[in-house]
Amino acid sequence: MYLYLGHGPRVLYLITSPHDERLGRPRRALVFRVGDSPIQAVVEFLSKDEIDLTNTVRLTNRVIKGCLGLISVEGDIFLALITSATEVGNTRPSGSKPESVARIHEVSFFSLTSSAWDDLPVSPEGSLGTDGVEGLQIRDYAQTSTPPPLFEHPCLPLTKIISSGSFYYALESPWDLSSRLAVRLARDTPSGDVVAFDERFVWNEYIVRSLLDFRDRLDPNERRDLDHCQFIVLAIQGYVGVFTMSLPAPPTNGTPTIATLALISRLGWKRAGTRFNTRGVDDDGNTANFVETETVFSTDQHCVSYVQVRGSVPLFWEQQGLQTFGQRIQITRPQASQPAFERHFSQLMDEYGAIHAINLLGSKENEQSLTTAYGRHLQIARGATEDDLSITHFDFHSVVKTGGHDSVIRDLKRLDTIVDHIDRFGFTMCNAGLDEIITDQKGVFRTNCLDCLDRTNFVQDILSCMTLEQYLQLVHREWILSNILWSYHRELWAENGDALSKIYAGTGALNTSFTRSGKRTLAGVLSDATKSVSRAYINNFQDKGKQVAIDMFLGNLSNQRPVTIFDPIHDSVRSALEQR
């Protein structure tokens, strides 16, 4: 796609490129201009042949990958466009349609109302690269001796967040990256009728909502063309990783099997924020750092999906003041947390079925107070759920101190509560190509530690490994001994831990050297120590500005109003019909 600017009045044209058209996409354009109010835009979906580009200019040399939505900032309406992205891979090659994912590297914001920002770079030198979440500094909160530029693009904080390398989108419009495999296969809605997605995980829902409403007003043929052009993008935040490998065949036929292992983590946005700014649960039952992680293993025979979740301890608690290494925990509103606690688990059970919580907090005074309160609240909540809600308390640090990280793996595999629930929950499996569900996952593990990062990721890696082994025992026992499969599995989980940690805490995860190699090394110990120091600095001095940018992106600021779309053709038709 290309972006053109027309003058008198100011109009932005997002049009399909010759490359898009060679791929079979329609020759269409999405046209934007400001409406009658500071928060209203006029949008039209036209044939490319209806547009005269003679007196227009190409606003950016970048090829546009898609549109994330419209947002009003400081009195201007801005169009958010993806200007750099790379393909991660096809997460399920055995499916009936490709399920490829792209990672966003750069986003640009173009004003509908003013030319003041046309030549001002949204990503100045020194801003974030694809992975530079650690260095994120925003406006008044920046800790730097260098004076800010005289004119700073009003969307620069948003650009830094979305261009951090932690956002992903589906490359092919029919498939929904925000929903796990079992949900997608169970839908009976005809493709193209509605945009189906899990609203818990679509981070640009606030700024793209008006465009989705505009899409819904189009007639079915126009809607199909709009989807085929892939103008509108739904983005998740988290991690997506894909490895393809050749696995040995049974001795009977000798032909190796091509298999794909993918890991998809979807971070929830409903209680979004940084480490010390966002903890615990809110009144609606949403928890901080809530992530759904799906392991997907596919061959030409089957596709297997295994889902786990993580999230902050679902109580009202916080950590105030300057935080160093002995984090002070304060449980707030202790008498009022039971309804929010039960609302959280009720939502989880409605979504996933049975829930088994794994609490990895330790026996130190601060963490012990959370563990005690967690167990007490869960015991009360269990009264109405029978066997569908249970918990295992596992002191991760104590086990590591006694026998090292290897002992965590051994102990978890010996715990009856863990092994029994792995057997009970199972996994989702479907036929390759036919997309028919053979067996469905019956429940999920909900794992937490204090931040739901390092310890949580370590244990979730083990649970994923145990479940994948369970599938291989049934289908291809010889693959259990495959070094390449488990090497890729470890690498994916290490990358996943780093990605989620950078989003929430500002640095990579601890323990990833062991996750990758299965060994605890001196270099790994020193790396963990460096990350801990970096986290303390970032969380205390930089996270407040990042939190403001996150809230702006999600529409949580008190003075924000969403951009609405005036559609002159369809609105007038609808108005005439209503008057009959």
Image: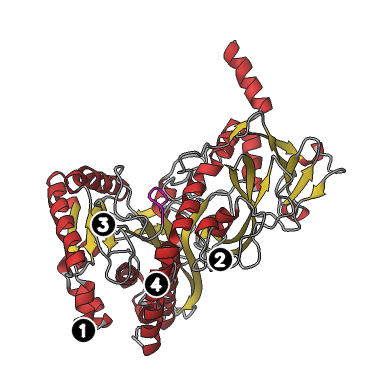
Query: Main SS type for the magenta part?
Result: loop
Tell me where residue 47 sits by quadrant.
Answer: top right
Looking at the rendered structure, the kind of residue marked 3 is: Val
- Amino acid type at circle 2 is Val
- Does 442 appear in magenta? no
Residue mark closest to the camera, 1 vs 3? 3
Q: Which residue is mark 2?
A: 88
Q: Give the mark nearer the N terminus: 2 vs 3.
A: 2
* Coordinates of residue 40 in the picture (x, y in percent): 62, 33
Q: Residues within 10 Å of mark 2 (few under 14, many from 20)?
A: some
Camera-side mark, 1 or 4 = 4
Q: Is residue 411 above or below residue 262?
A: below
> Which badge, 1 or 3, is on the more N-terminal residue?
3
Q: Which residue is mark 1?
A: 403
Q: CA distance from mark 2 to mark 4?
A: 21 Å
Measure how far apart labels 2 and 3 are at the Cα level.
32 Å
Q: Residue at x 53, y 68 (%)?
A: 132
Which residue is rendered at x = 83% and y = 43% of the image? 53
Nearest the camera: 335 or 338?
A: 335
**Position of residue 100 measured from the top left corner of the image (x, y, whole percent):** 55, 60
Q: Are marks 2 and 4 in contact (CB under 8 Å)?
A: no
Instruction: Give the camera-side residue of 311 and 66.
Output: 311
